[in-house]
Image: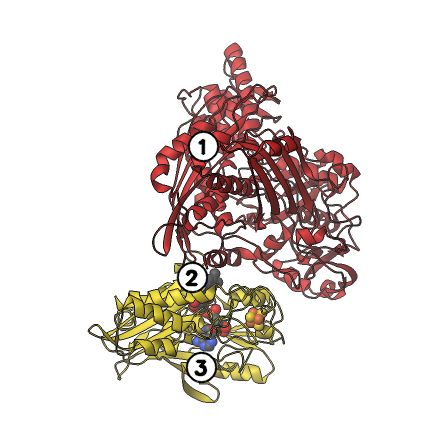
Chain colours: A red, B yellow
Amino acid sequence: MAVDPMKTLGQDTPRVDAYERVTGRATYNRDIKLPGMLYARVLRSTVPHAMVRRIDTSKAEALPGVRAVMTHETHKIPYGSGSISGGRQYSDPHKDITTRLRYTFNEHVRYVGEPVAAVAAVNRHIAEEALQLIEIEYDELPFVMDVEEAVAAGAPEIWEGGNIAHDSENRQQPIGGQTGDLQAGFSEADQIFEERFTTAFIQDAQLEPRSSLAHWEGDKLILHTPTQGVSNCRHDTARDLGLEDHQVQVVCKYMGGGFGDKNGNYYFDLIAAAFARDLGVPVMVELSRKDDWLGTHGRWHTVQDYRVGVKDDGTVTAIEVNGKSGMGPYLRRSGNVSGMDVYACENTSKAILPVHTNRMVSGNFRAPAYPQGYFAISSMMDDVAYKMGVDPVQFALKNMVRPTETKQFTNYALDQCIAMGAEQFDWQRRWNPNPGSAEGPIKRGAGMSFMMFNARLGASSAIVRAASGGRYTVYVGVTDIGPGAKTTMSMLAAETLDVPLSSVDIVWGDSDRCPYSVGESGSRCTTMTGFAVVEAARDLKRQIDERGLPTGDDVLIASATPAPSTNGKLREGFGAHFAEVEVDTQLGDVRVTKYLTVHESGRILNPLPALDQIRGAVIQGIGQALKEDVLYDTNTGHPLMTGYYFARHLTHLDVPEIENTFIETDDGYGPYGAKTVGESGIIIAPATIANAVYNAIGVRMKDLPITRDKILEAVA
Amino acid sequence: MKTFTNRNPESVGHAVSIARDAIGGGRSVVFAGGGTDLLQLVKERIPNRPGSGAPDVIINLKGIAEMNGVSRRNDGGLAIGGLTSLSAVSANTDVSARYNAVAEAAVSVATLQMRNVGTIAGNVCQRPWCWYYRNGFDCFKAGGNQCYSVSGENQLHAIFGGGPSFIVHPSDVAPALVAFDAIFRVAGSNGERRLSADEFFVLPRDDARHENVLADDEVLVSIELPAASGNVRSGFRKLMDRATWTHAVGSAAVALDMDGDTCRSASIVLGGVAPIPWRVEAAEQMLAGQTITAELAEAVGRAAVEGAQPLAKNRYKVPMTQRLVERTVLAVAG
Ligand SMILES: Cc1cc2nc3c(=O)[nH]c(=O)nc-3n(C[C@@H](O)[C@@H](O)[C@H](O)COP(=O)(O)OP(=O)(O)OC[C@H]3O[C@@H](n4cnc5c(N)ncnc54)[C@H](O)[C@@H]3O)c2cc1C
Ligand code: SF4
C-alpha cells in the first residue's frame, strides 16, 4: 500500500493563485465595488434575553444619506428556514418540520449580539451613525448562561418547551447511543474511574470579517459572499427567500479563512438580498470585527462526565459519557462530542444533550465535535493509565481500536502512527514516570494522544474541458478557504490527463459556472470533489484517446458525479501527537518546547499546504488548550472576551516548531488514495498539551483553557 | 465612528488653547498621540474622557516638534518628550545605559508596529483595559457609578489599592519611570505643573473615574528622569498571557543602586496589579545596605505582596507577584 511517486501529485506545489494573493490583486469580497451600491450595517441586541417592545427607526430614516431601515416589523425572513441551517448535505427535512424558527430579526431576542435592525445608506459611516439613532425598548426576560442551569427546573425558557435543543424530528433527546453491554463491561472491570471535564466556547476567529454584497437581475439574485461552499450557500439562500436554486447565483472568489464559520449562508446574506430587492441597487452588508465576533459563531462549550471500567491488566471494559453542549439560543449544528470510537472497548454509552443558553451561537469549528471530545476522553484515559501504573503509550497500544471481523478498515495505521511518533519524539527519555516530580519551579513534562478521523467519500461533481492548443479547464464549485483547493483540483486534473499543471485553468467559486461541490467543510473537498475531478478527467482522456485533441473552436467535455462508497468498511485518517511542555509553577506560564505529529492521511497530494494545514491546526489546538475563551459576565449576560486581544489567540512567538511526518498510503479509495488533512491536526492537540501539563505538574487539569490562574491554583 | 473635528496644533500652547476654547464652547476634547488606544475607543464609542461620550474634537499632537525626542538635562538627567515613540525610547542609548528598566519596559509593549506609532505620553495616559470598560459597560471609568468587575469577572484585576474601581494600571512604561522617580511635566490653561508620580497618578478611592490628575485641557508634555548614577542596575520583567501583543498580568520594574555587592538602595514598582504603578516600599527597604542573596530575594518577594487584597478570581496573582519580584530582583542583581 505504499505510494508510488507521481508526476504532479506529491510534488511541493505553490498555490496557483499565490501571486494574486500576496500582491493584493486577489479580489476579496469587500474589494468589490458595483455602480450605485449602498452599504449596510446591523444593529445588535444589548440585552441577553428580551422581547422587543418598541422599535422606532424614524430618526435613523431621517438622517441624510440613509436609504432604508429594516427590522422584524418590516421583514420576516426565516433564516436557515429552521433551527438547523446548512446546505443540502445537512438538514432539509428538518427545516420542513422544525417548530423553532429563527428569523433574520427576531422580536424575541435571545443573546447579546442578536441582530435587531439594519440600515442601508450611501456609505458605511452614515449607516453606522444611523444605527445610533434607532430607539429600542426591551421587555427584559430572565436569562441563563450555563448549560446545567439551563436544563434545571425553573430555568428561563429560551424556547417554549424547554432549553434542550430539538433533534431532526423535533424531539429533545441526547445525541449518542449504546454499543455492546455497558453493565457487563462495568461488572467485568476491576476498577472504575469517574471524572468531569469541561471545555470553553471559543470563536472560530477567521481573519476576514464578514460582508455580503447582493444585487438582482430581474428575479435573479446575485450574491457575493465569503462562503465555504457556493452550492450550499445558494441552496440555503434560495430556500430562505422562497426562490428556486437557479434563481440564486453565489460568487466567492477569494476568502480570508473560514474554519467552519463560513459554512452555508448567514442572516446578513438575506439582509443584503432584501435591501437590494427593495431598493433596486446593489447593497453590501459589512460586519465590523466586533460584529463578526458576536454575530457569527464558535465551538460549542461542553461539560462531559466520564466513567471508565478497567481490568487489572489495563484493558478498558466499559466507557460511559454523559454530557451537555452549549449551543447558544439557536441550533446551528449538532453539539455532538466525539472520540470514543478510537478505543477498542465494545461496551459504551454516550448521551450528549445539546442545550440552549443566552450566549452567542455555537456552530462548526474545524473538526466540530472532536477537539473538545478528544480532550476529555484522552485526558480521562491518560489519567486511568497513570492510576493503573501504565505508560500512556503502552496503554494506548493496548486499548486503541483495531480492525476486527465486524470493524474493517480500508487500511489501518494507528499503531504505526503511535510507534513512529514515540520513537521520533524519544518518548522514553522525555516522559516522566513520576508526574510533577521534576526538581525546581520550572517543570518539564511530556504527553501524547492519538486519533482517527473519518475520511469521507460522497457525491460531488466536476466538469473538465479540453480545447485546442492543449488547454484544459476544470470547473469545480470550490472557493479555496486556505488549504489550496484550487491548486489541488488543478493538480488532480493534470496528473490524470498526464499534462503539465501549467496547461490547466480553473473556474471556481461561482454557483452558476461550476457544478455542485460539497464545498470546503468536513475535510471532504479533496476526497469528494477531487474524486469527481479524477473521474471526469479520466473520461476526458478516454475521449481524447479516441478522438484526438480538439482543434479550432472544438472542445471536448467530460463531467462526473461519482458517489463512491467503501461498502461498509471504515475509511479513517489516523494520527498521534506528542508534546513536551515546561510549566513554571511559580509564575503559571506554560511553554510548549516540542511538538511532534505523525499523520496517516492517505496519499499526500500537495505536501506544502498539507504540512501547513497540520501546523495551523495544531496552533489552533494549542490555543484551545491553553488560552482561548469567551468569558461572559454572568450578572449581565454580556461577553467580555471579544476580539483577538481579549480572547488571547496565540501569536507566532507562542508557537513552537511543529514537526510532522505523513505516513503515506493508498487504500484504493478517494482520489489516488488521498484522505483528509484539513481538520486532522486540531483533533488531539488540546488533549496532547493537557496530558503533557499533567506529566509536568502532577495535577490533572480538567477544564479548558488551562490558564495561568488555574495552574497556580492547582499547584498552590 | 462619530464624526469629529480634527485639529493639528504646532505648539503646546496652541494645543492647550484649542482645548480650552472647545471646552468653553461646550464641546468635548481629547488629545491624540499615536492614537493606538484612543481610536479604538472612538470607534467603539466608549467614552475616553469619563462621561463625555465620543469626542467632538480630536487634537492631534503629532505636529508639535518640541514634544518629540529624548534630550539630556543640565542636572544629568533626561527629558523624554511626550510624543517620543516607544521604539525611539527603547533604542535611545542614553535611556538604555542609565535607565535600562525604562528601555526594557518600552520594548515589552504590544508589538513593533504599535511601538513605532505609540507614544510614551499615550502609553502613560492610556485608559484601562478592563474588559468591562472596553466592552462598553457604563462603569466608573466610563463616567458611571458602579464597578462590574468586583462581583463579576476579575481574574485580571487589582490585588492592591482597589476600590471602588479595580482596574490595573495598564502602562508597562509607567512602573519603570516611577522606579526612577520620574517627574511628569504638564501644561494646561492654568499654566504648567511638574508632578511627581505620587501627585500624577490617582487611586480610585480619590477619583474613581480617572487614572491621573490631568484636566481635560492638560497635555503631558514630557517626562523627566532625574540623574541616575552609573552604579544603578535596573530591569523590567513582564508576565503576559501570550508571548506578545498584550498587557501585563503583572510586571516588576526594579532599580538597584549597587556598591560592589552591596545594595545601597532599591526601587521596586509593580505594574498590572494595582490601579496605579505600585511601589512596594517595605520590600525596597529590606534591600538597603544588604548583599542580595537568593534567601533575601525570596523574603523581598514575600514582603512585596504583604497586604495584598485579592478578589474572588485573582488570588493567583498574589503568589505570582511574589515570585515575580523575587526573580526580578535576583536577575537585576546579576
Ligand atoms: C492590542 C493592543 C495591545 C497593547 N499592549 C500594550 C502593552 O503591552 N503595554 C502597554 O503599555 N500598552 C499596550 N497597549 C496600549 C497602547 O495603546 C499604548 O502602549 C501606546 O503607547 C499608546 O500610545 P499612543 O500614542 O498611541 O496613545 P493614544 O491612543 O494617542 O492616547 C492614549 C490616551 O492618552 C491620551 N494622551 C495621549 N497623548 C497625550 C498627551 N501628550 N497628553 C495628555 N494625554 C495624552 C489620549 O487622549 C488617550 O486618552 C496596547 C494597545 C493595543 C491596542
Ligand atoms: S474595574 Fe474599573 S474599569 Fe473595570 S468595571 Fe470596575 S470600574 Fe469599570
Instruction: Name the outermost residue toward the top.
Output: A546
Which-is-in-front pick, marks 1 and 3? 1
Q: Secondary structure at mark 2?
A: loop
Which of the 4 image quadrants contains residue B267? Answer: bottom left
Residue pointed to by mark 2: B110
Residue A154 is situated, as x and y percent measured from the top left of the image, at 77, 55
Q: Nearer the viewer, residue A386 or A278?
A: A386
* Disc number placed over residue B200 in the picture, else none: 3
Q: Residue at x 52, y 25 (%)?
A: A402
Q: Measure the C-alpha gap from mark 3 to mark 2.
A: 24 Å
- Please say if A230 is above or below A109: above
* Left or right side of B1 for A130: right
Question: What amino acid type is highlighted by mark number 3?
Answer: Phe
Which of the 4 image quadrants contains residue B298? Answer: bottom left
- Chain of the residue displaying label 1: A
Badge 1 and badge 2 both on one subunit = no
* Left or right side of B107 for A180: right
Q: Secondary structure at mark 3?
A: helix
Residue pointed to by mark 1: A599
